[in-house]
Image: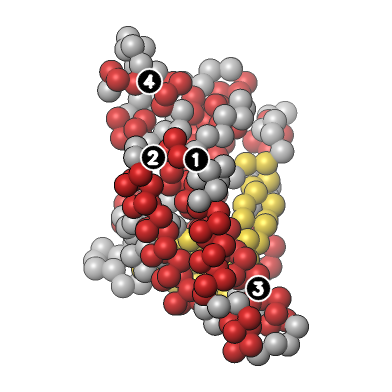
Amino acid sequence: MTKTLRERYTRRHYSYSAITSAEQCLHSWRRTYILGERVGNKYTSMGSVFHDVVEQQGRALKFNAMDGYPIEKITEAYPDSHFFNKFNAQYFNKEKVPHQYFTDKDDYVALYKKGVTALTNYLEYYRDKPPLYVELKFETHLAEDLPKVLGYIDRIDGEPDNPAEWIVTDYKSGSNPKSKDFLRKDTQLATYALAIKKLYGEFPAQVRYYHPVPDKFQIAVHQGDGLYEYTNQRNPVVSFSAYDAIEKHREVLELIVQAIESNEFGKTVEYRACSFCFHKERCKPFEKSEGWDAL
């Protein structure tokens, strides 16, 4: 009897990030998820600090509101300065944001200013909005033949007993919104929508990216039966079916399983992708090169 992907996949779970990594390069996926070479860069470090601080802010609003405190009292107890102090303490911690990630002091200061802009814009929008969930963890089967998918949703707003009206938000700390091509091919928001459908019985009303640096939302509204359409776009407007993410995951998981079974993790050499890869210094993407400089 032919085994399903769920039976053949030898790891406990997979994630959206793992799918994206394997789709781009199986060699990079192996270094990250098999060898555990989880390195970062200045952008991931700043993004991690930003996510940590806004998670603290969301939890402060959520739990104090649950205890019955009026929002005015909560924001008085947790002013913006409280969270900027948290951000500064983490950003200027060399273990959190290593200096070796930067070319010079100007580079270091420039990214700090970008982080301050992100936090300023975030607090302006979310200062008095207690979330329903912050960093909601899920681990579930999106389809019977697939292994469990693990993920963390940055923020959900709405009423606890009405998931069909929930607004799901993922923060992106980059300088620009995502391109239409990215939105068309990406499965992150679709994965979140599917997980909520699986665990809570309904697709959420909106799934969206929030880009706090340019202070922009990219919002996809549920049209019914897992179909989402982005708002405020010129034609052609991007839409996607959440169910298509299952097919994409199935396709990439098959590649991962085949690579594990054969112990062959081929390199995908592409200039732009390799330029942003965490493993570029160790990988030597060109067989006949002397290393990264050959690019």
* Left-right relation of 177 to 92: left
Q: What secondary structure is found at the residue carrying circle 2?
A: loop
Labelled pair 1, 4 in contact (Cβ < 8 Å): no
How far is the residue under mark 1 from the one under mark 2?
A: 8 Å
Q: Which residue bears the numbered disc 4?
A: 285
Residue drawn at the location 43% of the way across and 43% of the way down: 42
Labelled pair 2, 3 in contact (Cβ < 8 Å): no
Q: Is residue 6 above or below residue 35?
A: below
Quadrant of the snapshot with the N terminus: top right
Q: Which residue bears the numbered disc 1?
A: 98
Residue drawn at the location 42% of the way across and 59% of the way down: 115
Q: What secondary structure is found at the residue carrying circle 1?
A: loop
Mark 1 against mark 4, which lies toward the viewer?
A: 1
The answer to which image quadrant residue 281 occupies is top left
Which kind of residue does numbered mark 4 sit on? Pro
How far is the residue under mark 2 from the one under mark 3?
A: 33 Å
For marks 1 and 4 on the same chain, the one whose residue lies earlier in the sequence: 1
Neighbours of disc 4 within 10 Å: few (<14), some (14-19), many (20+) = many
Q: Which residue bears the numbered disc 2?
A: 102
Which kind of residue does numbered mark 1 sit on? Pro
For marks 2 and 3 on the same chain, the one whose residue lies earlier in the sequence: 3
Indicate the position of residue 275 as horizontal and vertical percent values.
Answer: 34, 33
Which kind of residue does numbered mark 3 sit on? Ala
Which kind of residue does numbered mark 2 sit on? Phe
Residue drawn at the location 56% of the way across and 23% of the way down: 259
For marks 4 and 3 on the same chain, the one whose residue lies earlier in the sequence: 3
Residue 130 visible in the shown view: no
Q: Which residue bears the numbered disc 3?
A: 60
How far is the residue under mark 2 from the one under mark 4?
A: 23 Å
Indicate the position of residue 227 as horizontal and vertical percent values.
Answer: 47, 65
